[in-house]
Image: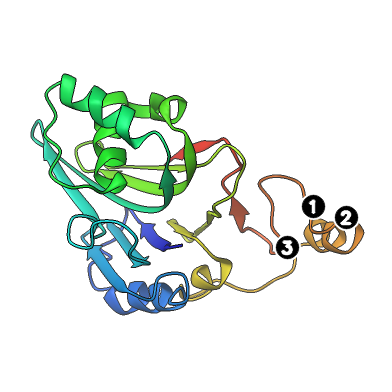
């Protein structure tokens, strides 16, 4: 189990929000006790807490790949079961694989397939990929929603994380209960309307869905 966090703001320079990113990431220490990493730039910040299972050196995150004059970055939580098949397809199409990590396979599969990547994945996952040339964040969650992925938009900033408590570390995010969400918790919990949470203006990526910001 690992944890991912990040935020994107196109209207202001967030490169000095390092402490915010680290505080968000530190709330996920139990998800990833072995290693942590982060990247922060003018308009994007992403971080990762890692539980090392495969390839300690080759699976470090955030992972960056430069391809066709573009830079891609990924933070990822999960396991891709058809890694072997995806790797074969990538190599047949000229991609060089440098590790034994499914993180590299996932990132390069996104470069190859684009948004259609989701239709080629067998596994449990929640991930975010930053496309530098497009200035675009791509997020996805596995088909049964095994891996969590929450988000909100606050004052022009898109914020995401594996757990709600990480989102509350971002300045200005309030813990305000949502009437429908709390009613569902007591009435039909743990079931709930897909995409919602018990907090106002904080949502989840639905199972079997992706999002682009």
Crowdedness near tag 2: few (<14), some (14–19) or many (≥20) residues, C-alpha within 10 Å? few
Element at label 3: loop
- Residue at 84%, 56% in the rendered image: 184
Describe residue 118's horizontal placement relative to residue 111 as left or right.
right
The residue wearing badge 3 is 198
Describe residue 173's horizontal placement relative to residue 49 as left or right.
right
Q: Position of residue 46 (x, y in %)?
A: 32, 60
Which residue is situated farthest in the top direction here?
A: 92
Element at label 1: loop
The residue wearing badge 2 is 188
**Residue 191 shows which numbered tag?**
1
Please state, as top left, top right, bottom left or bottom right, where the C terminus lies in the image. Answer: top left
Q: Position of residue 186 (x, y in %)?
A: 88, 64
Q: Earlier in the sequence, mark 3 or mark 1?
A: 1
Callouts 1 and 2 close, C-beta under 8 Å: yes
Crowdedness near tag 3: few (<14), some (14–19) or many (≥20) residues, C-alpha within 10 Å? some
- How far apart are the alpha carbons under marks 3 and 2? 13 Å
Describe residue 153's horizontal placement relative to residue 22 as left or right.
right
């Amino acid at each position: 189990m690992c944890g991912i966090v990040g935020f994107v703001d196109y209207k202001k320079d967030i490169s000095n929000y390092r402490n915010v990113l680290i505080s968000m990431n530190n709330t996920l220490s139990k998800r990833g006790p072995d290693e942590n990493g982060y990247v922060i730039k003018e308009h994007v910040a992403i971080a990762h807490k890692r539980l090392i299972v495969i390839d300690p050196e080759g699976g470090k995150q955030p992972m960056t790949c430069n391809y066709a004059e573009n830079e891609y970055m990924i933070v990822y939580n999960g396991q891709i079961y058809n890694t072997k098949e995806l790797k074969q397809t990538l190599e047949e199409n000229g991609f060089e694989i440098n590790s034994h990590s499914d993180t590299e396979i996932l990132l390069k599969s996104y470069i190859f397939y684009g948004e259609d990547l989701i239709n080629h994945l067998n596994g449990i996952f929640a991930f975010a990929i930053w496309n530098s040339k497009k200035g675009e964040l791509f997020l996805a969650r596995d088909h049964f929603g095994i891996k969590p992925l929450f988000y909100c938009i606050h004052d022009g900033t898109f914020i995401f994380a594996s757990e709600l408590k990480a989102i509350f570390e971002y300045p200005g995010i309030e813990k305000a209960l949502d009437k429908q969400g709390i009613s569902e918790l007591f009435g039909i919990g743990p079931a709930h309307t897909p995409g919602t949470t018990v907090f106002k203006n904080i949502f989840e990526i639905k199972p079997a869905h992706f999002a682009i910001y």
